[in-house]
Amino acid sequence: MAEPTFRAPKGTRDILPPESGRRRALIDAFAVQAGLGGFGEVMSPIFEDLGVFKRLGESTDVVTKEMFDFFDKGDPPQHLALRPELTASICRAYAEHRPVPPWKIWYEGPQFRYEQPQAGRYRQFSQVGVETLGADDPQADIDVIALAWRFYESLGLRQVSLLLNSLGDPSCRPAYMDALRNHLESSAAALTDQSRVTLERNPLRVLDSKRPEDQPVIDAAPLMVDYLSDDTAEHFAAVRAGLDALEIPYQISPRLVRGLDYYTRTTFEFAADALATAQNAVGGGGRYDGLVEDLGGPATPGIGFALGVDRILLACDAEDVFPGPVPTVKIFVVDVTGGSHALGVCNELRDAGIGADRSYGGRSMKAQMKVADRSGAPFAAIIGEDEVAAGEVTLRDLRGDTGQRRIPLDSLAYEVSQLLTK
Ligand code: HAM
């Protein structure tokens, strides 16, 4: 095959059928779980004012290195960015529309981060997620985590681990940050150059470093859980008790800081243990009790998560679960009289709610049967001159062993629907 003139940009992919159908089914499965939990869908813009995303943290990679930003053609031009995630957009929408709290919403769609692509890491990727705004009750945290857990289970995934931490709040974080900064500064000589730069901007982000040279210093760093105020410690205990009551297993992960700056109190991540790649985080989330206010809205607590659709599908492959939906075409109409009979037959079948397809270009019986096979349809309706003269079709079983038989054309839809319910 000749080299194509254009390819999809680096870090992006075309999702073709049947994989696209599997992805759609995954999003539908998520919509079902979100609906069961009382969440309504929000569809927000794919780009926002860059300022919305700056709130993710001036020292985060997402803001400093990975933003797809651009100026529009306005006068003066507005500095916009493709969304790297949806929590900030949802908080912006909350501040703009002031819905009655608690506001429980879910979303799905593409996100954009200018990252170095690798297995499970893309520049355009999809997330599904939920956010609950206006509830600081730990019960809301448990509900949200349980929803993600139930969703993974509904797909058939069994090898997902929940990692849990508390990042404290403005009442106790400063004391921890002082302790962390002191520790990192006193060990700065043992840190990499990159981590020394990060330390200047935000000591917490140093804990994100995956560089092996930084690990001894990180391992010896003080832990946020040892600095929690009574209030945040109580909140964290209530979340753990709720997860225990629901028998959702978790590991406390005291160094889990997440890659975005808005988190307070509960933070969590889901790791797919079946994925051998470095990118095995199939979801993450937590509380962000200051974000709405930061975006100009009223003081509003929030908790939510986003799950990476691309990585979840990789995890499903690794666990050999969630094969995706069965083909929608149930019957392939093979018309060897030129093709015009297939038109009416297909339309009648579709009117009856039965997926039907055909081929074009008046091809031979053999060629059309090949396409019928590829379509995944369990049945074929064959129309030749004989059948037309008799007002009949030949109904052939393509998957089972019931062979073929001639039936009246006007009973085709009924016969097929009977066979499909067997
Ligand atoms: P996040 O951890 O940045 O959190 O992303 C959530 C999930 O999106 C990750 O666990 C991963 O599965 C997927 N993901 C992230 N980046 C990529 C990428 N480059 N390629 C493929 N998948 C990726 C958030 O986005 C927060 N908004 C989550 C949240 C919601 N927190 C509170 N509410």
Image: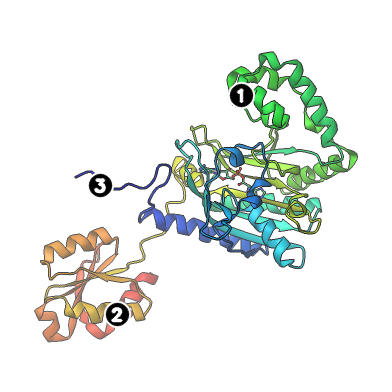
In the picture, measured across the screen, residue 220 lies left or right of residue 160, that is right
Residue annotated with mark 1: 194
Which residue occupies the foreground of this view, 160 or 255? 255
Q: Position of residue 384 (x, y in %)?
A: 12, 76
Q: Which of pointers 3 and 2 lies earlier in the amino acid sequence? A: 3
Question: Of the residues tagged 3 and 2, which is closer to the observer?
Answer: 3
Q: As shown in the figure, which amino acid type bears the numbered disc 2?
A: Asn
Mark 2–mark 1 Cα distance, whole angstroms, equals 64 Å
Q: As shown in the figure, which amino acid type bears the numbered disc 3?
A: Pro
Residue annotated with mark 3: 4
Q: Position of residue 97 (x, y in %)?
A: 71, 67
Colouring convention used in this rendered image of the protein: rainbow
In the picture, measured across the screen, residue 3 lies left or right of residue 65, that is left
Quadrant housing residue 210: top right
Q: Position of residue 328 (x, y in %)?
A: 36, 66
Quarter containing the N terminus = top left
Q: As shown in the figure, which amino acid type bears the numbered disc 1?
A: Gln
Mark 3–mark 1 Cα distance, whole angstroms, equals 39 Å
Query: In the rendered image of this protein, does residue 58 appear above or below residue 100?
Result: above
Residue annotated with mark 2: 347
